[in-house]
Amino acid sequence: MFLVLKTTVFYGKAASGNSASVALENSYLFASPLTAAADGQQLIRITAFILDGRGVGIPNQTVTLNSHPQLTIKNTQSVTDDSGKAVFDISSTTANLYPITAQVGNQPLPQKIKINFH
């Protein structure tokens, strides 16, 4: 008696390509940490994931943050990578609770977040 074992290995990743349309209800925005010192040095990272209707990231999408003028955006990666991720680092020298929203093209993401500089 012989036992035959077959192993299949898949390489690569799922990709939706540029032709997929943005599903605003699947896309999301988050911040980490939610609070930081208002010293102009400590950063809060805002990350947006732009996804299609299947939850797959859409590359090459320009994300714009709608933020307060007292916030400084540093080291931005405003165009999404292969996983649909855009990254923004934010600092401030003014203590306050700031609402943050984002949009892709002229489409606003429904999710809003609040960050706090103290």
Image (cartoon, helix red, strand yellow):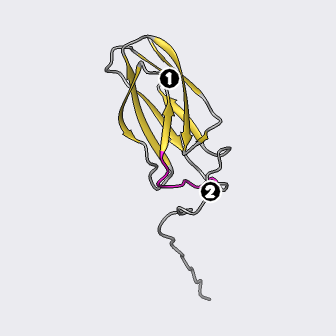
On-image quarter of the C terminus: top left
Q: Which residues are magenta?
A: 55-62
Pointer 2: what residue?
21
- Number of residues whose C-alpha sits closer than 10 Å to that of mark 1, classed few (under 14), some (14–19) or many (20 or more): some
On-image quarter of the N terminus: bottom right
- Residue at horizontal 61 percent and vertical 29 percent from the top: 112
Q: Name the dominant secondary structure of the magenta segment.
A: loop
Q: Is 31 situated left or right of 2 in this image?
A: left
- Residue at horizontal 59 percent and vertical 50 percent from the top: 51
Q: Is residue 37 visible?
A: yes
Give the answer, above or below, for where 105 lies relative to 15.
Answer: above
Pointer 1: what residue?
34
Q: How many numbered dots are placed on residues in this image?
A: 2
Give the answer, above or below, for where 26 lies relative to 39.
Answer: below
Q: Amino acid at mark 1?
A: Leu
Q: Is residue 57 magenta?
A: yes
Give the answer, above or below, for where 116 lies relative to 109.
Answer: above
Q: What secondary structure is found at the residue carrying circle 1? A: loop
Q: Amino acid at mark 2?
A: Ser
